[in-house]
Image: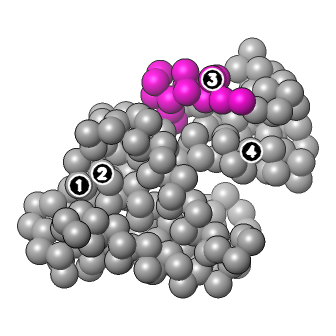
Amino acid sequence: MSRIQQTLAAIDALHAQDPETVEGKAKELIYAENMSAWLEKLNADASDELNIAVRSQHLCRWEIPRSEFPMDRPGYLKWRTELGKLHARKAVEIMQTQGYSKESCQQTESIIRKLGIKRNTETQTLEDCACLVFIETDFLNFAEKHPEEKVIRIVQKTWAKMSEQAHQEALALDLPAEALSLIQKALA
């Protein structure tokens, strides 16, 4: 097995510890696989650092429950910041055991923490993957639980984070009519 394969396998071993499962499979492992599938579509020649960052997007997410932070916007943002630090730290620990350089580890950490989004193409690609996974796998479920106005705002915020390539991929998804209708309302 190559170094990148060993690294991704170690990351997946942590994902597999997620106590939340879907049909017997760790939820975050499913998410990681979806993220990597989108990366393959968006950038089949991605660097090791980007592959690792994309695969680590929710690494050990369950270790920092949302309930530990105030249930308001500042609490949510603080939670997301702490998660980013956790994901990056865990990924870098694995990279170090696989012999990646300090520079590679720092690059991966920067991507995971979404530093330089819209300026760094690798960070943008990770964000695109996350947005596309949300639209493809979670959007309809999210929309069913929230008022239409909130859903439209979330779609607009999500869309603003995405590259033009990701916009085209999202519009090409085979989504149910109700999901497409909400996206069209948000983009109108």
Residue where numbered disc 1 is placed: 48
Q: Which amino acid is tagged 4?
A: Phe
Q: Could you tell whether 116 is left or right of 163 in the image?
A: left
The label on residue 172 is 3
> Do residues under tags 2 and 4 come within 8 Å of each other at their CB atoms?
no
Residue behind mark 4? 139
What is the three-letter code of the residue carrying label 2?
Leu
Q: Are marks 1 and 4 in contact (CB under 8 Å)?
A: no
Can you identify the residue that label 2 sits on? 50
SS label for mark 3: loop
Numbered label attached to residue 151: none
Q: Judge whether residue 168 is colored magenta.
A: yes
Q: Nearer the viewer, mark 1 or mark 4?
A: 1
Whichever of labels 2 and 3 marks the residue nearer the N terminus, that label is 2
Q: CA distance from mark 2 to mark 4?
A: 24 Å
- Label pair 1/3, CB-CB below 8 angstroms: no
Q: Which residues are magenta?
A: 161-174
Whichever of labels 1 and 4 marks the residue nearer the N terminus, that label is 1
Secondary structure under tag 4 reads helix
Task: Choose top left, top right, bottom left or bottom right for residue 8.
Answer: bottom left
Distance (Cα) linking label 1 and label 4: 29 Å
